[in-house]
Image (cartoon, rainbow, N blue to C red):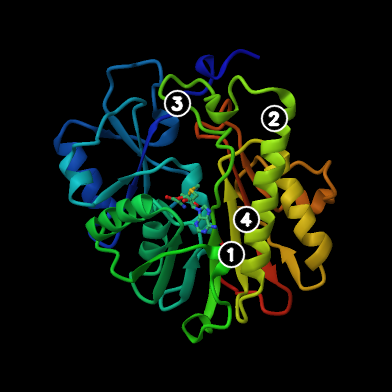
Amino acid sequence: EGSTKDQVPIPRYVRVNTILTTTEAVIATLSKRGYTHVSLSDIDWSDKKARWVSRDAHIDDLLLLPPGTDLHNDSLVTCGKIILQDKASCFTAFVLNPPPGSHVIDACAAPGNKTSHLAMLMGNSGTIWALDLDVRRLNTMKTLTQRAKASIIQPMHGNFLELDIHSPQFENVEYILLDPSCSGSGIVNRLDHLVDGPEAGTSEHDKLDRLSSLAEFQIQVIEHALKFPNVRRIAYSTCSIHTQENEDVVATILATHGKEWCLKKALPSWPRRGVSSSGLSQEQAACLVRCDPAHDATNGFFVALFEKIGHEPTNVK
Ligand code: SAM
């Protein structure tokens, strides 16, 4: 196999913020600027000059534009009508799917792309407590979510592992989104090469050490989420391609909590599923979502959806 550069190009993904506009209106604006609305199967990837816009096959209100399209200073972005967000990173909020009016915790929220996605899916009704340990990142989240007019978001500075599970304000929390710090090994940069990131140049031993401390933290985060008195659905994601942070973490949780919690099949129409060689049955692995940067036209990503047995919500994506 060749490098990612020779394989599927990654388009510019744009999530429409339905709090402020509609997908139809964004497509109409782009059409006026010379982008042709095409179906996915009609995209000519070899024509580097073509301007096109297409709807994504899996995520509602997600659009694709040609790879490399720069919209950072575009008025649609600066006024919050569209959000530049990779397709895979839209999966977490999409599969958690909290209905309007829900109480939700986004435990590791900054800079808030998934938080504003949650707010939009909830029709900007209910409450989202959006926590982060890092003040600067939290401030970025405040700016971006205010721009998106996602008014149900309550930013909180703090350590999720110390968040009081018995606080009355969280007693109706049924949905929790967990997107904790990870190795980032699935992120591809603009040249479409895998980023070596913090792992570059370190010894095999140091890499394994780092992965096991990340996994320990990720397990603690899920363990803490499971303790909230009324939680019924938890979405866990990483932008890592390592099983240690993905399937192995899920297997550890199910080994301890498998009587009360099960995996729900997330995004059933997505073909790439979890790896089963890690203490998970094939059936369990098939519930998990993986994205491979070399083949899926996204960053590398992983999603697991846990549900409380006997209290499963019925709204499934
Ligand atoms: N969900 C975010 C988004 O979609 O924009 C990205 C989250 S990033 C992968 C992980 C975040 O977890 C970082 O912003 C980091 O500061 C935060 N974090 C790390 N440890 C934490 C903890 N113990 N409690 C709360 N936040 C934490």
Query: Circle 1: is it few (<14), some (14-19), or many (20+) Cα within 10 Å?
Result: some
Q: Report if the CB atoms under discs 3 and 4 are less than 8 Å apart.
A: no
Give the distance between the C-alpha atoms of the residues marked 3 and 1, in whole angstroms.
31 Å
- The mark lying in front, picked from 2 and 3, is 2
Q: Earlier in the sequence, mark 2 or mark 4?
A: 2
Whole-percent x, y for residue 266 in the image:
62, 55
Q: Earlier in the sequence, mark 3 or mark 1?
A: 1
Whole-percent x, y for residue 54 in the image:
35, 38
Identify the residue shown where x is 69% and y is 56%: 219
Q: Nearer the viewer, residue 27 or 127?
A: 127
Q: Earlier in the sequence, mark 4 or mark 1?
A: 1
Q: Is mark 1 within 8 Å of ligand 1?
A: yes
For disc 1, the marked residue is: 161
Tell me where residue 153 sits by quadrant.
bottom left
For disc 3, the marked residue is: 189
Identify the residue shown where x is 66% and y is 70%: 226
Q: Earlier in the sequence, mark 2 or mark 1?
A: 1
For disc 2, the marked residue is: 206
Element class at badge 3: loop
Element class at badge 1: helix
Give the distance between the C-alpha atoms of the residues marked 3 and 4, in whole angstroms.
27 Å
In this rendering, does residue 286 appear at all?
Answer: no
Residue 266: assigned label: 4
- The mark lying in front, picked from 3 and 4, is 3
- Residue type, mark 3 in image: Asn
Left or right of 110? Residue 174 is right
Q: Earlier in the sequence, mark 3 or mark 4?
A: 3
